[in-house]
Amino acid sequence: MRSFRGRGSAVSTIIAITTDFGTRDGYVGAMKGRILSICNDVVLVDLSHEIAAQDISGAAWCIARAAPNFPRGTIHLVVVDPEVGSGRRGIVFRAGGQIFVGPDNGVFDRLLDRYQPEDVRAIRSTTPWWSTHSTFDGLALFAPVAAHLARGLAPSKIGTRTTIEPRLTQIPALRERDRIVGRIEIFDRFGNGITTIPSALIDPEMVARCRGACFPIADHYAAVEEGEPLALIDSDDRLELAVRNGSARAAFGLERGDEVDVEPADR
C-alpha cells in the first residue's frame, strides 16, 4: 500500500514541531517522547514553541514562513489547539512536497494560500495506534499520527478523504488608483508589523501611514536614524512597518488589524 511519505523515504524523516506550549511545563517533551517510542530514528526539529497561547493566526503565519524551507518529505506537527476536546477535526495532508498534521482550525490557512493541499484526511479519533483526549491531543492524537506516518503508515489507515476550508478571515490589500490599502496581519518578536500588502504593489517613492505615523519606504533598516520609523519589504515579500533598533508596535501603539495606507510620498 502506498506510503503517505512517497518515494525517497529511506532517509531519516524530519518531524518539525510547532506549538504554543513553551518549554517550561514538559508538554513538548512528552510529545517528543511519544514520537520516539514509536519511531526512534526520526530527526525532531523545534520549529517554534513561542507562539502566543491560543494564537491560531500567529501559528498560521509561522508555518507559512518556515515550512517552505524544509526538505521534501518533512512532517510538520502543529499543535495550537484552543478547541481541544471539542468536535473540531484533526487533519493530515500533503502540500509542497511535505506532510502536515494538526487541528483543522486555521493553523494551515496561510500555508494553503501558497500550496494546493493533496490527499487530505480527517484523522480517525480512535485506532489501535492513537485516540483523542479532552485536554492534550498533541500527545494522545497528533504525535502518534506523525510518528506512524514517519514509519510509513498508509493514508487509508489515518482516516477518510476530506477537504480543507479556510478558517481565518483575511482582507486582501486593495489598490485604489495610486493608493494602496492593507492591514497589519501579525507582529514579529521585534515589534515589526507585517502587513497584507505584497511587494508587487509597492513603489520606492511611496510612504506607508498607520495610526497617524509615517513610515518612509526604505531598502534596509539602517537607512534611517536610530529610533526612526521606516517601511521595507520583508523576506516574505510583504510590506513591514518597523523602527530602527526599536519596536514599531510599542512606539506607535499599533495593533493587529490596523489599516495601513500606502501612497505617493509627495502627497
Image: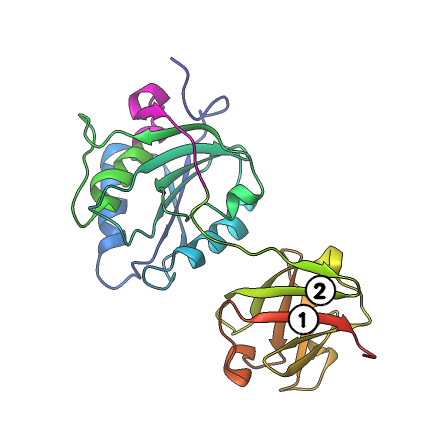
Residue shown at 22% from the left, 57% from the top: 26
Taking 137 as reference, is 224 above or below it? Answer: below
Q: In which quarter of the image is the N terminus?
A: top left
Image quarter of residue 53? bottom left
Residue 154 counted in the magenta span: yes
Give residue 180's mark: 2
Q: Name the residue under label 1.
A: 261
Report the number of discs: 2
Local packing at callout 1 (Cα closer than 10 Å; few below 14, some 14-19, many 20+) is: many
Residue 76 coordinates in the image, percent (x, y): 41, 42
Circles 2, 1 touching at the beta carbon (< 8 Å) = yes
Q: Which one is in front, 192 or 41?
A: 192
Identify the mark nearer the N-term, 2 or 1.
Answer: 2
Find the distance from the CA under tag 2 to the CA under tag 1. Answer: 6 Å
Kind of element beneath mark 2: strand
Residue shown at 47% from the left, 50% from the top: 63
Q: Which one is in front, 26 or 205?
A: 205
Residue 58 placement, left or right of 139? right
Residue 258 coordinates in the image, percent (x, y): 54, 71
Task: Identify the colour scheme used.
Answer: rainbow
Residue 59 coordinates in the image, percent (x, y): 42, 55
Taking 19 as reference, is 36 above or below it? Answer: above
Residue 44 placement, left or right of 259? left
Amino acid type for the residue under numbered disc 1 = Asp
Local packing at callout 2 (Cα closer than 10 Å; few below 14, some 14-19, many 20+) is: some
